[in-house]
Image: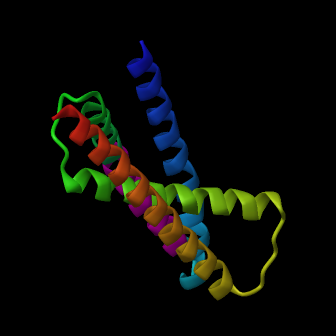
Amino acid sequence: MKTSILATLIMIALLFICYRLLFIFLDVSSIFMESDSDINSMGKVFLFSCPFLFMVGVWAAYRFLRINSGTAEYKNYVVILLSLYGGLSGVVITDIVMHSLSVTMQSYLVIGMILVISFFASAAATFYGAKNHLTNKDRSRD
């Protein structure tokens, strides 16, 4: 029961991340695009790649849960995938905070740098946290 609830929450979080990333992607791509049709095309590209992003996230969460429960062996690529999703979560959280505070910056470079810094900070925190957690679980299993 606990695992099914956790899996449902992970899927809802992944859907929310994909939803918010679409708007972030459209905002950032509108800086560089010249017409509305170019922005529309970039949105379609993101929507085409979004199922892949969702499926890889579900698979990484599944591997994490299996390693956590002791039924799978620890591999480095799981931590790297989780840190990628941690970075994307950091971008989404930063975007939500900037919109809730009604931050109106005229410089797109500043906004882009804030999003890049939040991605790398969240990815690094997720990488070290997940790696420590999974290596401790894997060591205790032996």
Most extreme residue toward the top is 1
Q: Residue at x 59, y 81 (%)?
A: 113
Give the quadrant of residue 61: top left
Q: Is residue 57 left or right of residue 139?
A: right
> Which range of residues does the magenta coloring cover?
37-55
Q: Residue at x 78, y 80 (%)?
A: 105
Q: Is residue 34 visible?
A: no
Residue 54 drawn in magenta: yes
**On screen, residue 39 above or below 141:** below
Percent of width and height locating residue 9: 50, 30
* Residue in front for this viewpoint, 63 or 33: 63
Percent of width and height locating residue 40: 51, 65
Q: Quadrant of the N terminus?
A: top left
* Residue in front for this viewpoint, 45 or 67: 67
Residue 40 drawn in magenta: yes
**On screen, residue 125 above or below 19:** below
Percent of width and height locating residue 111: 66, 78
**On screen, residue 101 above or below 133:** below
- Dominant SS of magenta comes to helix
* Residue in front for this viewpoint, 71 or 8: 71
Give the quadrant of residue 91: bottom right
State how the image is colored. rainbow
Q: Is residue 140 left or right of residue 35?
A: left
Q: Quadrant of the C terminus?
A: top left
Q: Is residue 118 visible?
A: yes
Count all numbered tags in the image, as a single digit.
Answer: 0
Percent of width and height locating residue 56: 29, 47
Q: Is residue 7 left or right of residue 31?
A: left
Q: Is residue 8 left or right of residue 114?
A: left
